[in-house]
Amino acid sequence: MIIKLAQELANRFPDQNEFFKKTVVQLGVELGMSEAEASRFVLAQPKVRRGVYNLEAQLLPFRRTVEDQPQMSGGVSSISNDEVFVPDADPTYVPWGHFKDVESIIRSGVFYPTYVAGLSGNGKTFMVEQACARLGREYVRVQITPETDEDDLIGGFRLVNGETIFQKGPVIKAMEKGAILLIDEIDRGSNKLMALQGVMEGKPVLIKKTGEMVKPAPGFNIFATANTKGQGSEDGKFIAATIIDEAFLERFTITMEQPYPTLATERKILMKHMEKFSKVDKDFAENLVVWSETIRKTFEDGGVDEIISTRRLCHIVQSFSIFNDKMKAIELCISRFDLDTKEAFLDLYTKVDSDVIGSEVTTESGVENEY
């Protein structure tokens, strides 16, 4: 049975030598081995890091180069690059919002497609990534654009060393490795995303271009992030957001609405970023969160058309560490807004932080304003 297990690992993961113990044991049980027998096989191999072992020596006899592999019709072979990885834990991350729910879903190992919606810059993508990091789960992120199609997602033919090779896409790689697939900005895609209909059901998928049937490995799951709920942007704030087909949306088990963090959480996030950039200023962090909270409440009441995201606050902290000037850091990070909005936000900050009164910043007209 050990030989059969090694052979199956070599066939399923042609370019991979390092495996999580759980992955190998699950495959062994699938092939009829006992958990104890499969576990002993893994533990006898060199340990790379916690829970990960190098099985190269065991798989080498079953490896075949591209030249040795049987040719498909038309002289086409198949390859799969190893792009799935366990993300690094970020020391600046502060768990909040739906983090515990996301962590529970991933830990369960159940196929449970989850849609995460929320305004820009509030940590949707980061949340899923860091949940994978903390649980040691493999993860692959797919960035969606209006041009994303089946070839980008499932895979397509590529010319490699003069040969036509079918290269598996990120979705198939995630399925084969039982990884977490993050579909980022899913509401930016076109109707070509319907190529994922079968994948969204958690069932084996036929790769039409090769005839290969791919069965999702245990632990495979899908998260999608978006600024809208798939119904377009009525206020025009996200004009690139499209209306997603209802049949596609129905395949998501749940939808999470991600808000911005509370004052306490956002304060903690900013302090961690200040520590990261070696520029700690508790009063500045406090003033920034009060300032952003005031703007968000005004935005909700319809008083302003723009908002200060958590991501933008982190950018301000980074800029402050470079220029050592609060008002300059704020001005540079909000200059993307129109002149009236920018000046209103700057004026509001001077009311929150009296220490900056007298600072000078340059407006888009080139005139220096004193606050």
Image (cartoon, grey):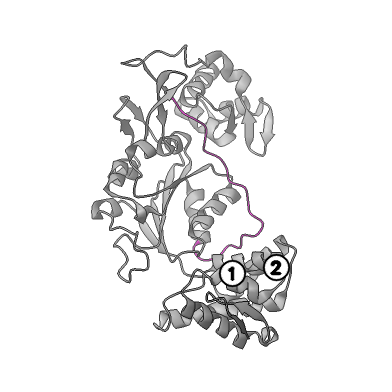
Identify the residue at image location x=56%, y=13%.
61
Q: Nearer the viewer, residue 72 or 39?
A: 72
Q: Position of residue 237 (x, y in %)?
A: 37, 68
Q: Quadrant of residue 353?
A: bottom right
Question: In this rendering, is residue 72 above or below 131?
Answer: above
What residue would you read off at disc 1? 332
Boundaries of the magenta span: 79-98
Residue 68: which numbered mark, if any?
Answer: none
User: Does residue 95 show up magenta in the picture?
Assistant: yes
- Which amino acid, mark 2? Phe
User: Does residue 195 show up magenta in the picture?
Assistant: no
At mark 1, the secondary structure is helix
Helix, strand or loop: magenta stretch: loop
Identify the residue at image location x=60%, y=51%.
134
What residue would you read off at disc 2? 323
Identify the residue at image location x=52%, y=61%.
123
At mark 2, the secondary structure is helix
Question: In this rendering, is residue 166 above or below 234?
Answer: above
Q: Nearer the viewer, residue 361 or 287?
A: 361
Q: Position of residue 217 (x, y in %)?
A: 44, 35
Whether residue 28 appears in this view of the structure is yes
Q: Mark 1: few, some, or many residues within 10 Å (few <14, many ≥20)? A: some
Q: Position of residue 279 (x, y in %)?
A: 74, 67
Kindly indicate whether the residue at mark 1 contacts the one at mark 2 (C-beta within 8 angstroms): yes
Residue 370 shown left or right of residue 164 in the figure: right
Q: Position of residue 26 (x, y in %)?
A: 50, 33
- Which amino acid, mark 1? Leu
Q: Quadrant of residue 196?
A: top left
Of the two numbered discs 2 and 1 on the same chain, state the one appearing first in sequence.
2
